[in-house]
Image (tube, helix red, strand yellow):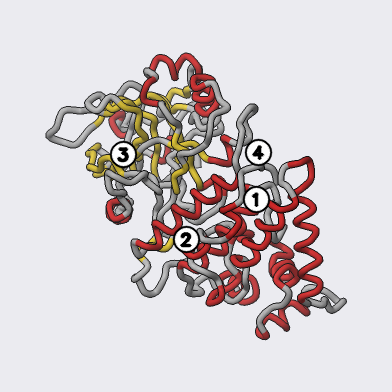
Amino acid sequence: MIDPFVFNVVEDMEEGKDYGPGGLFPVKLGDVLGPEGSMPRYRISAKLGHGSYSTVWLARDLVARRTVAVKIVRASEYATSREAAILKRLRSPASDPPAVIQLLDSFTLTSVNGIHHTLVTEPVIPLERLLKLPGIQVNTRSLVRQALEGLAFIHERGIAHGGESPVISNFLSSQPLPDIYPSNIGVVIPDLDSFSEVDIWDKGGAPTIVPLVTYNPAHDAASFPPYLTHARPRGTPHAVVSLLSFPSPLDSLRRGHVAYFAEETPSPPCHSPLVFTAPEVAFPMMAHDNDDAPWDRRADIWAMGCTMCQIAGGGIPFGHFSNLLHNIAALCGGAPADWTTYLASLSDKPKAYTPEASAALWAARVEHLQRGGRHSAEDAHALVKLLRRMLVVDPMERPSASALLQDPYFDLAPDDHGPLSG
């Protein structure tokens, strides 16, 4: 099939064919958007992310005089109204520091392509990306505590995290990839509102654009923008870091993704990266090609444990997905009886999954965490004890997020600083 547009798009751009009836909302830099029947108020400054599902934009709220993120969903998608309902349930009281990304506004936009649900939130930068920038100083314990506080906040309001429903992402991506892992934890940049659009443009530089010129003169020009814009998820953090003269404390974590109301039955399929997926979901998926295994908020505890290990510099606990179940059984010191046949099929040589072998693997993890002076011995041992409480094969034995916040690890003095590592 011949591409209906003349010029080829580049990386970090959606495709011209994503525009049309039922497709994306046509946006160009400088557009001012707002609820129908009201004065437009959100001026588009830069693209933050895109996908076949939606586009996400950095914008200036001309009424509140603040910087926001605007997510505009394609006309054929309806789940964002549900996404907005979840975010409304997750709104923090004005007197409390918000634990999750805050919904500032929601409305619909109309184009020749249809009706588009639109969400406005505070903009955040993925923790994983921000921590890889030079000069960022990190208190690992503070980061993992805030991430766990966000998860507890979500669970207390009857919402579990992993799932299939469209998500807020961290508003630097528009893909519906829910669950808990470092790229899905966002950091709200302090004092961003004190800088003008010109400040951010000057630091971020001009975006790459590709004109959208159609071969077909009958193609409705109102259904697509005059050009596609290069997304700015890579440049924007550098620009903000330069503006704010980092390092500064990363004390404004936001949980970026939401998923499903916990009272929903059955639970939607879990679509997290496999290496972060809880064993009660991963085993049916890998051994029986069953993507519909039930799960609940206890699966979030497992994913959070994997995430905390990676944030702390201990890497992904269970390695590559091809050996995932073997590694889970080895590190956890055993596996359910119904795993036996599948695990035996992975190798000609039987593996011994014993508590003693597990203890040796965790001891090696403690040593890894201490390399380079990143963690003291006391800190590394306390962190591993916490992770072992979370990374338990039987979901019924995993503590709640609220209970985990009382773990002795969080009482230690902060002494671990440095960049995120694998």
Q: Secondary structure at mark 1?
A: helix
- Which x, y percent locates residue 375? 71, 46
Q: Residues within 10 Å of mark 2 (few under 14, many from 20)?
A: many
N-terminal-most mark, 3 or 2 = 3
Q: CA distance from mark 3 to mark 2?
A: 22 Å
Give the mark nearest the N terminus, 4 or 1.
1
Mark 4 element type: loop
Which badge, 3 or 4, is on the more N-terminal residue? 3
Which residue is label 4 attached to?
417
* Above/below status of 358 relative to 107: below
Q: Amino acid at mark 2?
A: Gly
Q: Is residue 181 visible?
A: yes
The alpha-carbon separation of the residues under discs 1 and 2 comes to 18 Å
- Spatial CA distance of label 2 from label 4 is 29 Å
Label for residue 310? 1
x%, y% of residue 244? Answer: 49, 22
The mark closer to the camera, 3 or 4, is 4
415 relative to 165, above or below: above
Give the residue pinned by disc 2.
Answer: 162
Q: Residue at x 73, y 74 (%)?
A: 333
Q: Is residue 38 left or right of residue 377?
A: left
Front residue of 132/244: it is 244
Q: Which residue is mark 3?
A: 120
